[in-house]
Amino acid sequence: MPEGDAVWRTARRLHQGLAGQVLVGSDLRVPAHATADLAGRRTIEVVPRGKHLLHRIEGDLTVHSHLRMEGSWRLHPVARRHALGTRHTVRALLWTAERVAVGESLGMLDLVRTSEEHRVVGHLGPDLLDPRYDASLAVANVLADPARTITEACLDQRNVAGMGTIFTAEPLFELGLNPWTPVGHLPTETIEDLLHAARRMLVRSARAGRTTVTGQADVNQDDGFVHGRMGLPCKRCGKPVRLATIGRQPQERVMFYCPVCQGGLAPNDDGGRQAPLGHGRSERRTR
């Protein structure tokens, strides 16, 4: 699932391409809004809210979407609208005289009153990429359930919006925290430091135009320390990075971590050999 930085970049591209432009037509391919006609309305802005996208249009209307695992929004020349529209994965088309925004494999698509956006995003906690981010509220939300693991608390978008597995695993590694630590076992200052680190990484990635942990690698390099590096040497201690599940279904996730640098094996990790993920990365590139 795209994390907050990727959603922020998507919103920025859509905003730059559509803001101030009048929609010539629309095609929302969900039963509840299949007959909606947005033609003649001007795009006011496209903004992110955590992992949600809010495309605000004249007349108190917002096209709300969530990318989930496979979704995307892309801009194309309007001449390609008919060809692109034949794809069975397309869920939305919004076009001006020059461009067409194509929403594919969207996990969520709604048309709501802008004045009632709280119906679709009101449950979210403070957004780490929001200039008005409320750090105190985010920390209080995470601390609210002391028995939860710190990973589950951070991934819960009702507590703090924008963190996914990358920007949970990497800040946890930076601070040397075991992902399976109960929230109640951590000082408030540690929670503050963790969320601050996550926000710093997300802001850096948003500004860089790509997902990056340190900001030092180029687009062809992986500068992460643990995420995606199962079976490869930890860049800090040299021992293999590991992968284990965390949480309960249907919210169960997988988490990458270094048991040496982060306080031991996960409760459900037997310590057996784990082969590197087969995604083409070499140890030379990730060292």
Image: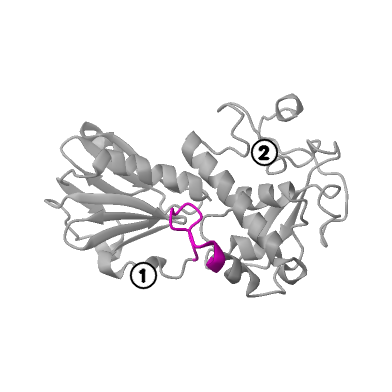
Q: Which residue is mark 2?
A: 224
Residue 44 image point, x, y percent: 22, 51
Q: Which mark is residue 283?
A: none
User: Element type at marker 1?
Assistant: helix
Say which quadrant the C terminus sits in: top right
Between 48 and 271, the one lying in front of the other is: 48
Residue 231 pos. (x, y %): 79, 40
Residue 245 location (% of width, % of height): 73, 58
Residue tagged 1:
118
Residue 42 location (% of width, % of height): 17, 50
Residue type, mark 1 in image = His
Q: Is residue 206 left or right of residue 235?
A: left
- In which quadrant of the rendered view does residue 234 lie? top right
Identify the secondary structure beneath mark 2.
loop
Residue 82 visible within the image: no
CA separation in Å, label 2 and label 1: 35 Å
| Depicted 261 relative to depicted 148: above or below | above
* Residue occupying image coordinates x 70% and y 74%: 146
**Is 233 in front, or is 195?**
195
Q: Inspect the magenta stretch and tell me whether residue 126 lies in it.
A: yes
Pick whichever of labels 2 and 1 is earlier in the sequence.
1
Looking at the image, which residue is at 48% across and 41% down?
A: 206
Q: Quadrant of residue 266?
A: bottom right
Q: Which residues are magenta?
A: 125-137
Q: Is residue 42 magenta?
A: no
In the image shown, does 81 or 75 lie closer to the viewer?
75
